[in-house]
Image: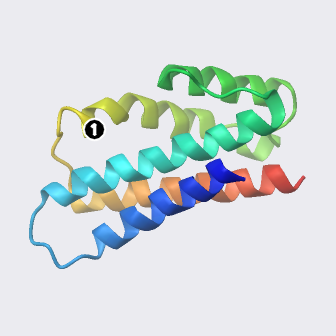
Amino acid sequence: MRELKEAEFWLESAKNLMTSASPNRERYTVVVAQAIHSIIRANDALTLRFLKKRAMRHDDAIRLFRELISLNKIPSKFADLGRTIIIPAVQTKSKADYKGIEVSKAEAERWIRKAQKFIECVKECLRA
């Protein structure tokens, strides 16, 4: 599925930038933006498969994820990812993309872990 493959490439790009030799701290902001793009594209993979639609606005990603839960397309063990990953991703996206918030290395690493966790969830849901 195209959306999932793109999500994996966004995450790979974030990981590569994270380990780059660049001394510039601004790269952490870009890492966060890339990880969030990864999460949103992975969510698109779910919503396209099960709902035949994608979020037209980033806020729609939250609503569609909740819809997937209510339709039992998301196992209950992943239901908290809406609150712990999707909502924070949508809330942080424009800050990282357009406002250039300052991000620490630790925060960038957390977003990489969140994106990895969400992609693993998506893969499991798509296999079911």
The residue nearer to you, when weighing 76 against 45, is 45
Q: Quadrant of residue 108?
A: bottom left
Residue at the (65%, 28%) spot, across then down: 54
- x and y percent of residue 93 in the render? 36, 35
Considering every residue shown, the one lying at the far front of the view is 2
Q: Is residue 3 left or right of residue 14?
A: right
- x and y percent of residue 15 in the render? 39, 69
Against 36, residue 72 (above or below) is above
Q: Amino acid at mark 1?
A: Asp
Mark 1 burial class by Cα count in 10 Å: few <14, some 14-19, many 20+ = some
The residue nearer to you, when weighing 33 against 92, is 33
Q: Is residue 21 left or right of residue 118?
A: left
Q: Is residue 27 left or right of residue 77?
A: left
Q: Is residue 71 left or right of residue 96?
A: right
Q: Secondary structure at mark 1?
A: helix
- x and y percent of residue 19 in the render? 29, 76
Against 58, residue 28 (above or below) is below
Residue assigned mark 1: 97
Residue at the (82%, 43%) spot, across then down: 75
Q: How is the image coloured?
A: rainbow
Considering every residue shown, the one lying at the far bottom of the view is 21
- x and y percent of residue 79 in the render? 71, 37
Residue at the (29%, 68%) spot, across then down: 17
Residue at the (53%, 46%) spot, across then down: 39
Number of numbered callouts drawn: 1
